[in-house]
Image (cartoon, grey):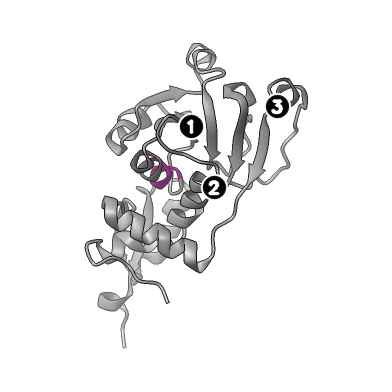
Amino acid sequence: MLHVPTNLDAAAAAPLLCAGITTYSPLKHWGAGPGKKVGIVGLGGLGHVAVKIAVALGADVTVFTTSPKKRDEAHKLGAQKVVLTTVPEELDAAKGQYDLIIDCVAAEHPLNFQLLKRDGTIVLLGVPEKPYALAPFPLIAGRKRIAGSLIGGIAETQEMLDFCGKHNITADIELIPIQQVNEAYARMEKGDVHYRFVIDIRNTLKA
């Protein structure tokens, strides 16, 4: 049985059991913390929680995004820097700086291994529809690694919840009644959610 810290809002804490553990596990496993530069690719349901956790761990955090609109949001979440991947000059300036990159994007996109330091790791959390086409030389040249991570076990999930309770971390959510679930699903398909929907069953489910 898991215990949710009482200082956390229950609705906003609910996505931690998915997005929280999915991002906490690789951040802890690959040593995100003081003195480490961590990149978060994609500022969505996973990415925004990853930023909060990485910042709380003490890492220097950069968000990589295609959307200029996400720049201010990323800074509000605690990211020290934002790089627009659609701007070549910004991407070039970030090369060779990162110990760890957590890639939260599920759509097809380039894997920018050139952003990693020597011995750096990029961890894939998203699953695009089509397989990645990997060029080996960028990995070979810097002894870089590509890895994947799913979620975590019960013990690590409780560790994550306790950590989030200590640092007052929850997901940014929209709380909706059960009657709006179809509308919410349609919005989710369009990417129109900030950043997770949570369904209020207790107060809106009919007997």
Give the crowd class for mark 1: few <14, some 14-19, many >=20 residues within 10 Å: many
160 vs 135, nearest the viewer: 160
Instruction: From the top left corner, tell me how far across and down residue 180 is, in percent.
Output: 35, 65
Q: Quadrant of residue 50?
A: top left
Residue at 46 percent of width and 48 percent of height: 46
In the picture of the structure, the residue carrying the numbered disc 3 is 143
Q: Earlier in the sequence, mark 3 or mark 2?
A: 2
Instruction: From the top left corner, tell me how far across and down residue 12 is, in percent.
Output: 30, 59
60 vs 34, nearest the viewer: 34
Circle 3 SS class: loop
Marks 3 and 2 sit apart, C-alpha to C-alpha, by 19 Å
Amino acid type, callout 1 = Gly
In the picture of the structure, the residue carrying the numbered disc 1 is 39
Q: Which residues are magenta?
A: 47-51
Q: Are marks 2 and 1 in contact (CB under 8 Å)?
A: no
In the picture of the structure, the residue carrying the numbered disc 2 is 29
Give the crowd class for mark 3: few <14, some 14-19, many >=20 residues within 10 Å: some
Q: Are marks 3 and 1 in contact (CB under 8 Å)?
A: no
Q: Is residue 202 above or below residue 159?
A: below
Circle 2 SS class: helix
Marks 3 and 1 sit apart, C-alpha to C-alpha, by 18 Å
Residue at 31 percent of width and 31 percent of height: 75
Instruction: From the top left corner, tell me how far across and down residue 87 is, in percent.
Output: 49, 16
Circle 1 SS class: strand
